């Protein structure tokens, strides 16, 4: 659980997930590999054509006015790839006994997000005010521009796209989704009762690796303060 779900019933707990800009590059690359022939690239180009020409991609007003067309193009690409989506991200989860720094008996599991699922996270993020661009929308715009450059130039410069198309938002992360939003995606028996027990941790962290931790995150701190797990 995170701060947005800590007061909810356990069945409604959720985990925050943070997407970094390089992940959007990997997402774009995973799509491009499915359109790597002349015929397939032309099909991708046709799906991106519905957006009018944008001359100043760094200008919020110019890009925001075409956001719905950009989104529509990305959703068409998603539909075209629905049957060939691929794993992109592994998201581990861990559960404690409420707010206490003690792991539950059943405490560890992992979820797999496909490339198209990451797009869905962006699409179903928070709503935005008209005329501005939030992190979720910026992610869709970044992805569209990477794909557009791919069909136009056979390549894209993701660092340049992220640097120039920041839209007055920090680039430390593409977006983050709090637990009360991610719950609808992760809601499952595995979220409520993870499959790996805390007693398996000693078979995962080997060779005294727990003694090398310098806790900066809560999970690291739990492990450092639970030496009995490694007895």
Image (cartoon, rainbow, N blue to C red):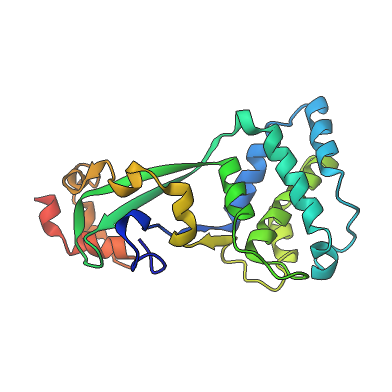
Residue found at the very far bottom of the displayed protein: 168
192 displayed left or right of 178: left
In terms of depth relative to the viewer, which is nearer, 180 or 51?
180
227 displayed left or right of 173: left
Q: Where is residue 91 drawn, in percent x and y?
A: 42, 48
Answer whether residue 48 is visible to the viewer in this image: yes
225 displayed left or right of 3: left
155 displayed left or right of 10: right
Number of numbered discs on residues: 0
Q: Residue at x 62, y 28 (%)?
A: 83
Above or below for 112 versus 127:
above
Answer whether residue 156 is visible to the viewer in this image: no
Question: Residue 42 lies in what quarter of the image?
Answer: top right
Q: Residue at x 73, y 52 (%)?
A: 157
Q: Residue at x 30, y 57 (%)?
A: 10
Q: Where is residue 221 drawn, in percent x and y?
A: 25, 65
Q: Quadrant of the N terminus?
A: bottom left
Question: Residue 153 lies in what quarter of the image?
Answer: top right
In terms of depth relative to the viewer, which is nearer, 108 or 124?
124
Above or below for 84 versus 94:
above
Q: Where is residue 170 drawn, in percent x and y?
A: 62, 71
In terms of depth relative to the viewer, which is nearer, 153 or 35?
35
Q: Where is residue 97 drawn, in percent x and y?
A: 21, 60
Q: Residue at x 71, y 67 (%)?
A: 133
């Amino acid at each position: 659980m995170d701060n947005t779900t800590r007061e909810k019933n356990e069945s409604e707990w959720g985990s925050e997930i943070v997407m970094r800009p390089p992940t959007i590059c990997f997402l774009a690359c995973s799509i491009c590999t499915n359109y790597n022939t002349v015929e397939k690239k032309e099909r991708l180009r046709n799906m991106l054509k519905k957006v009018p020409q944008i001359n100043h991609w760094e200008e919020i007003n110019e890009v925001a006015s075409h956001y719905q067309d950009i989104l529509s193009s990305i959703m068409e690409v998603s539909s075209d790839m629905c049957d060939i989506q691929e794993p992109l991200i592994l998201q581990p989860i861990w559960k404690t006994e409420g707010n206490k720094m003690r792991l539950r008996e059943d405490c560890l599991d992992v979820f797999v997000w496909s490339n198209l699922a990451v797009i869905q996270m962006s699409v179903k993020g928070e709503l935005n005010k008209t005329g501005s661009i939030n992190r979720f929308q910026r992610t869709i715009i970044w992805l569209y521009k990477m794909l557009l450059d791919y069909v136009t130039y056979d390549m894209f410069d993701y660092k340049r796209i992220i640097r120039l198309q920041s839209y007055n938002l920090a680039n430390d992360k593409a977006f983050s989704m709090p637990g009360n939003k991610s719950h609808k995606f992760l809601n499952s028996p595995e979220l409520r009762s993870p499959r790996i027990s805390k007693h398996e941790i000693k078979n995962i962290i080997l060779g005294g690796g727990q003694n090398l931790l310098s806790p900066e995150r809560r999970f690291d701190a739990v492990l450092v303060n639970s030496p009995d797990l490694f007895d």
